[in-house]
Image (cartoon, grey):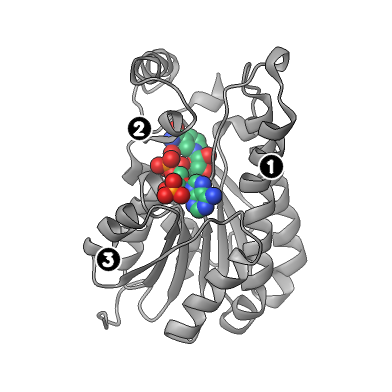
Amino acid sequence: MSSPSNLPFSGHVAIVTGAGSGIGRATALALAQAGANVLGVGRRKDALDETARAHANIEVLSVNLVDDGAPAQVVATAVERWGRLDLLVNNAGGTAVMPLAEADKQVIADLFHLNVVVPSMLAHEALPHLRTSSGSIVNVSSTYGHRPMAGGSHYSATKAAIEQMTRSWALELAAEGIRVNCVAPGPTRTDVMLAAGLTPEAVNDMYAYEQARIPTHRIADVDDIAHWILRMAEPAGRQATGQVITVDGGLELI
Ligand SMILES: NC(=O)c1ccc[n+]([C@@H]2O[C@H](COP(=O)([O-])OP(=O)(O)OC[C@H]3O[C@@H](n4cnc5c(N)ncnc54)[C@H](OP(=O)(O)O)[C@@H]3O)[C@@H](O)[C@H]2O)c1
């Protein structure tokens, strides 16, 4: 579908991982509304199809990103479909509530694979195309990528890794015209804790606890986060690279 040429992402092609739900779905939709053609990626076909139905500029690919060859398949799909790639949003991720006393080698390895290895290989595969388009990467971290999280040390460590990779890739790629930035959400109402195995009651308790602590006393909704992902990616933001913007109602300040 063609878009009016005055939109900020008009003519651009974006990949958004984790686009079947939560922050990823909101980001895919916001990018499409801002003129981009979007490839939304995730495992659940039905969830992705629901995202695609929200805007004609969104197409989807159902794939498990931890599978061998998946990052290359994702990038090839976007480039074969639209002939270019301008933006990679590394949003898909997982979390685990796991105190040190319960540390499990496989859980740690799986978290690092999904939250660190997958975005790295997607960025690697995207690189030749981002060089051509002077494109950009937006990684999704967390407030807990730069503050401690009792009971969530390994999740926190994966997000610290993506923040540090953001800075290093930004420095490495700046001279080639590629920008790399990161959005670090605070508590945001999505299914991420349910996906990590918490009961709905435990999730509600967690949000109530966080809402009381957050200086603005507000849990983010997904559009609050998508807004900043677009701001970091849009061409008018061209002077910002290597930055981590925290969107958490002031939680990181306390
Ligand atoms: N919600 C919060 O409070 C919060 C706070 C800070 C940071 N974040 C970060 O925000 C990002 C998005 O999370 P969310 O809150 O929007 O939760 P979410 O709705 O659970 O989104 C996670 C997405 O990742 C996809 N995904 C997970 N494993 C995958 C795999 N192996 N292959 C392909 N896709 C996979 C999921 O889709 P499928 O299950 O269909 O594969 C899902 O759409 C994550 O990186 C998370 O760490 C969230």
Measure the C-alpha gap from mark 1 to mark 3.
32 Å
The answer to whether mark 2 is within 8 Å of ligand 1 is yes
Which residue is rendered at x = 27% and y = 83% of the image? 2
Q: Could you tell me which residue is drawn at 47 percent across and 70 percent down?
A: 235
User: Which label's residue is closer to the chain start, 2 or 1?
Assistant: 1
**Does residue 128 lie above or below 251 as drawn?**
below
Looking at the rendering, in which quadrant would you find the N terminus? bottom left
Residues under labels 2 and 1: Cα distance?
Answer: 23 Å
Residue 228 location (% of width, % of height): 43, 50
* Quadrant of the rendered image containing residue 145: top right
Q: Nearer the viewer, mark 1 or mark 3?
A: 1
Location of mark 1 (residue): 112
Check disc 3 and report the residue beneath it: 33
Tell me if residue 9 can be seen: yes
Residue that appears at 47% across and 66% down: 15
Q: Is residue 185 visible?
A: no
Q: Quadrant of residue 5?
A: bottom left
Name the residue carrying label 2.
Answer: 189
- Residue 217: x %, y % from top left: 35, 20
Amino acid type for the residue under numbered disc 2 = Arg
Number of numbered tags placed on the structure image: 3
Q: Nearer the viewer, mark 2 or mark 3?
A: 2
**What's the amino acid at mark 1?**
Phe
Q: Position of residue 220 (x, y in %)?
A: 36, 33
Q: Residues within 10 Å of mark 2 (few under 14, many from 20)?
A: some
First of labels 1, 3 by sequence position: 3
Vertical placement of residue 88 versus 193, above or below: below
Give the residue type that dot 3 points to. Gln
The image quadrant of residue 204 is top left
Q: Looking at the image, is mark 2 or mark 3 earlier in the sequence? A: 3
